[in-house]
Image (spheres, rainbow, N blue to C red):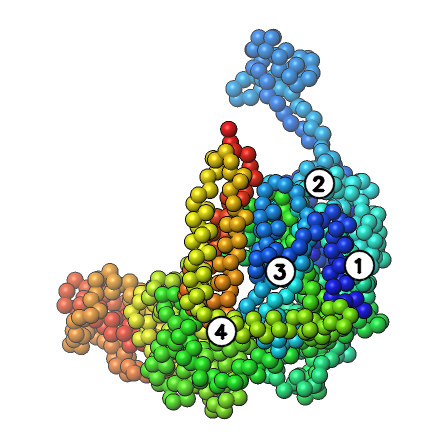
Amino acid sequence: MQSFQDIIFTLKRYWADRGCIIQEPYDVEVGAGTMCPETFLRVLGPHPYRVAYVQPSRRPADGRYGDNPNRLFKHSQLQVILKPTPDDVIEQYLGSLEAIGIDLRKHDIKFEEDNWEAPTLGAWGIGWQVMLDGLEITQFTYFQQCGGIDLDLVPAEITYGLERLTAFLQVKDSVYDIEWTKGFSYADVRYRDELQYSVYNFEAADIPTLWKLFDLHEGEAARLLKLYDPKAADKKRFPLLPTYDHVLKCSNLFNTLDSRGAISVTERVGIIQRVRKIAVGVAQAWADQQQEVAQ
Amino acid sequence: MSLPFLLEIGTEEIPDWMIPDALEELRLLFVTHPAWRMPPNPKMDATPRRLVLRAEGLPTRQEDSEERVMGPAKSAPAQAVAGFARKQGVRPEDLAVESTPKGEYYCYTRKVEGRRTKDILGEALPGMILQRSIFPKTMYWTDKKGPRFIRPIRWIVALLGEEIVPFEIAGVHSGALTSGHRRLGAREIAVTSADYEQRLRDHYVILSAEQRREKIRKELAGVRIKPDPALLETLVYITEYPTAITGSFDAQFLELPEEVLVTVMRHHQKYFSVEDEHGKLAAQFVAVMNIPADPEGFVRRGNERVLRARFNDARFFWEADRKKTLAARKADLAHVTFQAKLGTYLEKTGRVVELVKELGGDADAARAAELLKCDLTTELVKEFTELQGVVGGLYARADGEPQAVWQAVYDHYKPESMDDAIPRGRTGQLVSLADKLDTLRGCFRVGMIPSGSRDPFALRRAAQGVVRILVEGKLELPLLDQLEGHQELIHFFADRVRFYFKDHRGFAYDEVNACMASGWSNLVDLEARLLRVQALRPTPDFEPLAASFKRIRNILSQADWQAEAPAPLDPALLEPGPERDLYEEYRRIAGQPIEHVISKLRPKVDLFFDKVLVNAPDARVRQNRLALLHTLLAEFSPIADFSEIVTHS
C-alpha cells in the first residue's frame, strides 16, 4: 500500500520530470494553494513558469473538531501550475494518476464543468472538477484573470486533494485512518490540529483582537501600496512580496472571523471588497513591476 | 460530381448542457453560408470531446457564371476602347457592342470560374467555428490575444471526399486524424469520411447521442429507476462510451428523509435513484460510467464509498441540526440578510406573519409563517441549498408541528415552475402567498423591478406563483388590495394574469382582455367569467352581439357620453317600435345570466340599429337613446367588456 507521503513523493517526482520547479509550502497561512505567490503572482505577466508544491490549506469554517471523516480544517493540496499550458496537459495529468497506480482503463474518469472564481482575488478561470469513480479528486482550471488582469499566457492550474486521493487509493472511509507512513496514521499526525483549531476558530478566538489584527494588516498593505511608484527607476526592489503577505493575513483573519460567526451577511460583501482591493492592488503593481520602466 | 464532407472539432470536455444548442448553431452557420446554391442538409453529432458535422453531396466546385462588364461608348476614342479591352485581358475586336437607351456601348462578357468547394470551406470554416454565438461562455487558452472557444481545440478533422480541407485554428491544423476514447482508444486514428464512425466505435467512442441514450436505456431496463429524462441527457453528453452499473448502500440510511437522499444521488453524484415495487426508495442506485465494463467492481465499489461518505455527511448535518428545534432558530434569522435594503429574514418573518393573518390565515398559518425561513440557518440547507423549504418542513415534522404547519413550510417555495403543483392545503397556500407578496411588494418599493431578462430575485416566478395559487387554490382574495396602489406592480401583475390565462390556460387574448376590462382583482371570479365567455363564443348570437357592443361603445365615446353622471333614461321619450321593443326586452332580461338571454336580445339590438337613428335631431331624444345604449352595455359589463372581442363580421 502506498502511504500518504509515498503518493506525494511520486506526484512531485512526476511533475519534476516534466520540468516543474518543486517548491515547498508557502510559510504564511492560506485558504488554498492558489493564493500562494507562486500561483497568484507568477501567473501574471509574460514569463513562462512551471511549479508544483504541496500547500496545507486552511478553511476555518470546514473544521469539525476531528469528528467528521471527510471534512478538515486544514487539508493538503498539491498545486501544479503550467504556464503556458502544454497542448497535452490533460494527457500529462492523467499520466500522473497512472503514476500513483490508478489503472484508468478500469476506473471511471469524468471531467465535469466547474468554473472557478475567487472574488477576493479578482481571479477566475474555466475548467472542471475531475471525478474518479464518483469522487472529486482534482480541480482543473484554465486561469483567465487574476487580480482583475487578463493573463498574457493562459496557465493550467491542477489542484489535487491529497487526503481524498489517498483515502481512495488506500480504500479508507475516514481520512483519519489513512496511513501517513508505516506506523503513523493521519489521525496520529493531524488530529490535534483539527480539534484545537476547531475550538479556537469556533469558540475561543477573541473577536475584537482578530478585527484589530485585520485592520493592522490591511493598513500595512495599503500603506505600502500607496508608496509603489511605477515610474521609479528602482521599482524592482519595492517590497511587493511582503505587502502580499499582509493581504494573505487579512484573508485568513477574514475566514477565521467568519467561522467565529462574527461577520453578518451584510458586512460580508464589504469585507470581501476590502481584501479584494489590496489583493488586486498587489497584483497590478506586480504586473507593472515585471516591466522595465518606460523611457 | 458531389462529395461527402466531414468536419470534426476535437476539444477538451465540453459542458454537457451546452452541446445540443451548440450543434444546432453550428448547423445553421453551415447551411446558411452564401456559397451554397442548394443548402446542404448536414447530420450533426457530438460527444463531450467532439462536435461533428457530416454533409453528403457537396459540389466539388461552384458553377461557372458570367459577368457582363460595360465599357466606353461606341463613340469614344480608340485609346479608351483599347484601354478597356486591355483591362479585360482581350483584344479590342473581342469586345461586343450593345445598344442601351443611352446609346451604343462596348461591353465584354467575362466567364467567372466557380470556386472549388474545398477553397470556400477552408476559408469559411475557421470563422464559423469561432463564432461566439455557438457557446454561451468562451475561454482563451493560448494567450489573451488567442482565439476563444468553449474549451481548447486539440485536433480538427476536415475532409471533403478524400482531400483534407486545410485551415488552422490556434496552431491546430486540420487533417485526417481523429482521437479515440481518452484511455481505451488510440490518440491518433486515421479516418476517411466513409469509415469515420466505425473507426471511432473501434476506439470506444459511440458517436451518436441517440445510440448512447439507447444503450443506457437498455441497461436500465431491468432496474426500477425513478424516471429522470434531464439526468439521462446529462449522462448522454458527459460520456463517450456509457455503461450503467447498479450499486447499493446501507439500508440504515433510508431512515434519512428521502428528499435528502435523492438530492445527494441526483444533484451531487448524477445517479438515478431506484424504487422498490411499492414505489418506495430502495437502497440502490444506478451510475453511468464512461467505460464499457467494470469486471473487478472497482467503479461500483468506488461510487458506493463516495455515496456512503455523502450520506454520512448528510446524517451528520441532520443530527447536528436536530439538536435545536426549528422554532428555536428564529432569533438567528436576525443575522441573515434578506436583501440589503429590505432588512433581515427576521424582519421579513414578522411581515409575513402579519400578512398571512390579514389574508385570513388561522393559528396554523401564523405558526408556519413564523417557522418559514428558519431552515436557512441549518447545516443541511447550507449543504443542499436546493432543498430550502423542504428541509424546514422536514424538521418541523420531526419537531412534532401539526401537519398543516409542516406541510406549509415544506411547500412554501411552490410552484417553482409552470408545471409544478401549488402548495397542498389552504394553510400552505396562504403562507406561500404571503411570502411571495411580501417579496414582490418589498422589491418594487425599493425599485428592484425586473426589466427585460434581468430578474435576479425571480419576481416573475413569484408573481406567477401568486396568480396560480389564487386561481387554482380558488382563493377569492382581492389581489389589487395587496398591491399598495403601486402602479408598476399592478402592471406587472396584469401581465402575469394575462400570461397565465392566455399562454398557460389557452384562452383567446381578446377574451382575456374583455374579461380583465371588467376587473381582475378577484382572479377566481375572472376565471369563472372567462369560462362563460369562452362557452358563449361559438354560439351564433355571440359575435354579432359583440359587434353591436363595439358599435355602442364607439357611439357613446363619439357622443362624449359621461358614464359617471349619465342622464337618467326616460321611458316616456322612447319611440314605439324597435326602440321601445329594445327597452322592453332589456326590462325583461335585466339581472338574468347572459347565456339565457343572448338569443332574445340580439334580434332586438339588430333591429334597433337597423331602424333607429341614434343621432336624432331632438337633443332630448338623442340623449335618451344614448342612455338606453349605455344601460344595455352596463347590464353585461360585470362579466366582460364585449367590445374588446375581435369579431370577423
Mark in front: 1 vs 3? 1
Q: Which residue is mark 2?
A: B171
Left or right of B376 in this view: A59: right
Eyeballing the image, is B538 above or below A24? Answer: below
**Residue drawn where x is 52% and y is 22% of the image:** B101
Q: Which residue is mark 1?
A: A99
To the question of a shared chain for discs 4 and 2, the answer is: no
Crowd band around label 4 with a 10 angstrom C-alpha radius: few (<14), some (14–19), many (20+): few
Eyeballing the image, is B157 above or below A190? Answer: above
Label 2 is found on which chain of the structure? B
Q: In terms of secondary structure, where does tag 3 sit?
A: loop
To the question of a shared chain for discs 3 and 4, the answer is: yes
Q: In terms of secondary structure, where does tag 1 sit?
A: helix
Q: Is residue B451 visible?
A: yes
**B279 or B297: which is nearer to us?**
B297
Mark in front: 3 vs 4? 4
**Residue drawn where x is 42% and y is 58% of the image:** A215
Q: What kind of residue is marked 1?
A: Ala
Q: Which residue is mark 3?
A: A114
Horizontal and vertical percent position of residue B232? 68, 69
